[in-house]
């Protein structure tokens, strides 16, 4: 029951204490829905109807769902070794690095070359099955990056992000984008697992301070946070290695301090609804092309993937020189 120590809810001790002071105010459960696929579902990369219903329901109600045991650990371990090294390179750039709100959280791309491109991770079939069920057939994948929660350098102190929405612009009031997060290690409050505010995905941009284009855009107003905390407090869940987390782009959340000594990398792939006119494109090395074309030929991709293909040299030279999170434009063409 490790999870519940960090997440208050109506049915656990802290919620009860409050309930007795203010009996009219029953708080909603703040822990996320966790799907545990059967061995067969994991093997096939396909959820059966009951689990799919659970996932889709959680996304509509809460704006987030966790699916455990979706990705083999050996693929995660290989990528983690490389990305932890890269994270330290980015961290050494200090304030000039691609930091998100503060130097404890870095925007970091995965190496976009074939030897690091595992389809089980980047085009996970269960993730796509879920996003397709919410967004419609053939979602468009135009963002592929990661957030790295960094242990502070010697003498530095850990810091948290302000609660924010990644949809820092006027957006549709129905689901249009889902973030597929893949932590490369188990995430807990000790290494900076993301704070999430379930059920906040239906709010509009008037809840926010800082418009797109400002350095720290999308911050949620303090008065709204205080009010929401009384209804449904936030939660910092433990998420096991091998899980995927699917989150509505609009959901309030915050990167939290990494209190440990190991980097915590969490990939972020955004699937947009097929009708949503996001203009971004991915940049991958040419040697990933046959991998994606193979999946497409076998009917195992299920995504539209606009890619600028470049040589390996250019790909490897560029991927650690990209923008910080809020510099990307998740909006759509008129
Ligand atoms: O790293 C995390 O846990 C979340 C980071 C985040 O939300 C962001 O940088 O926008
Ligand atoms: Fe964010």
Image (cartoon, grey):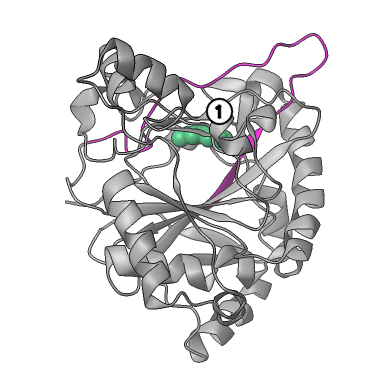
Q: Tell me if residue 19 comes above or below residue 212 in the rendering.
A: above
Residue wearing tag 1: 6
Secondary structure state at the residue bearing disc 1: helix
Note whether 217 is above or below 241 in the view shown. Answer: above
Q: Few, some or many C-alpha atoms within 10 Å of disc 1 (few <14, some 14-19, many ≥20)?
A: some
**Is residue 227 something one can see in this rendering?**
yes
Where is residue 209? Give x, y as percent.
29, 19
Q: Is residue 222 in view?
A: no
Q: Residue at x 38, y 72 (%)?
A: 50
Tell me which residue sits at (34%, 46%) in the image: 63
Q: Quadrant of residue 260?
A: top right
Taking the spot 30% from the left edge, 58% from the top edge, the residue there is 57
**Is label 1's Cβ within 8 Å of ligand 1?**
no
Which quadrant of the rendered structure holds the N terminus? top right
Tell whether position 164 is magenta.
Answer: yes
Q: Residue extending furthest bottom?
A: 298
Helix, strand or loop for the magenta stretch, by majority: loop
Spot occupied by residue 94 in the image (x, y as percentages of width and height): 70, 21
Looking at the image, residue 68 sits to the left or right of residue 315; the answer is left
Q: Is residue 295 above or below residue 15?
A: below
Image position of 281 with respect to 154: above or below: below
Magenta segment: does it hold 111?
A: no
- State which quadrant residue 251 falls in: top left
Q: Is residue 36 left or right of residue 152?
A: left
Q: Nearer the viewer, residue 73 or 4?
A: 4
* Along the line of sight, the residue nearer the viewer: 189 or 231: 231
Q: Position of residue 284 (x, y in %)?
A: 60, 63
Marks counted in the figure total: 1
Which span of residues is magenta-colored?
Answer: 144-169
């Amino acid at each position: 029951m490790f999870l519940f120590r960090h997440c208050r809810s109506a049915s656990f001790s802290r919620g009860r204490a409050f309930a007795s002071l203010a009996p009219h105010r029953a708080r909603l459960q703040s822990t996320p829905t966790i799907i545990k696929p059967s061995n067969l579902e994991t093997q096939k990369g396909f959820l059966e109807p009951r689990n799919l219903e659970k996932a889709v329901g959680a996304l509509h109600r809460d704006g987030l769902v966790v699916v455990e045991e979706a990705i083999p650990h050996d693929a995660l371990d290989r990528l983690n070794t490389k990305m932890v090294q890269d994270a330290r390179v980015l961290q050494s750039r200090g304030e000039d690095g691609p930091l998100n709100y503060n130097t404890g959280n870095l925007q970091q791309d995965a190496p976009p070359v074939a030897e690091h491109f595992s389809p089980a991770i980047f085009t996970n079939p269960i993730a796509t099955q879920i996003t397709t069920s919410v967004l419609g057939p053939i979602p468009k994948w135009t963002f592929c990056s990661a957030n790295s929660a960094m242990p502070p350098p010697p003498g530095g102190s850990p810091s948290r992000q302000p609660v924010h929405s990644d949809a820092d612009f006027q957006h549709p009031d129905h689901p249009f984008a889902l973030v597929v997060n893949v932590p490369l290690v188990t995430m807990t409050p000790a290494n900076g697992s993301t704070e999430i505010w379930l059920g906040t995905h239906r709010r509009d941009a008037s809840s926010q301070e800082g418009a797109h284009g400002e350095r720290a855009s999308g911050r949620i107003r303090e008065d709204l946070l205080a009010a929401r905390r009384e209804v449904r407090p936030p939660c910092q869940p433990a998420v096991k290695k091998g899980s995927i987390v699917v989150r509505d782009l609009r959901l309030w959340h915050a990167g939290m301090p990494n209190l440990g000594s190991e980097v915590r990398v969490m990939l972020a792939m955004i699937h947009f609804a097929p009708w949503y006119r996001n203009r971004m494109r991915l940049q991958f090395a040419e040697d990933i092309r046959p991998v994606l074309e193979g999946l497409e030929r076998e009917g195992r991709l299920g995504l539209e993937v606009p890619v600028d293909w470049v040589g390996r040299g250019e790909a490897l030279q560029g991927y650690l020189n990209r923008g910080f999170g809020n510099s990307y434009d998740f909006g759509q063409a008129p």
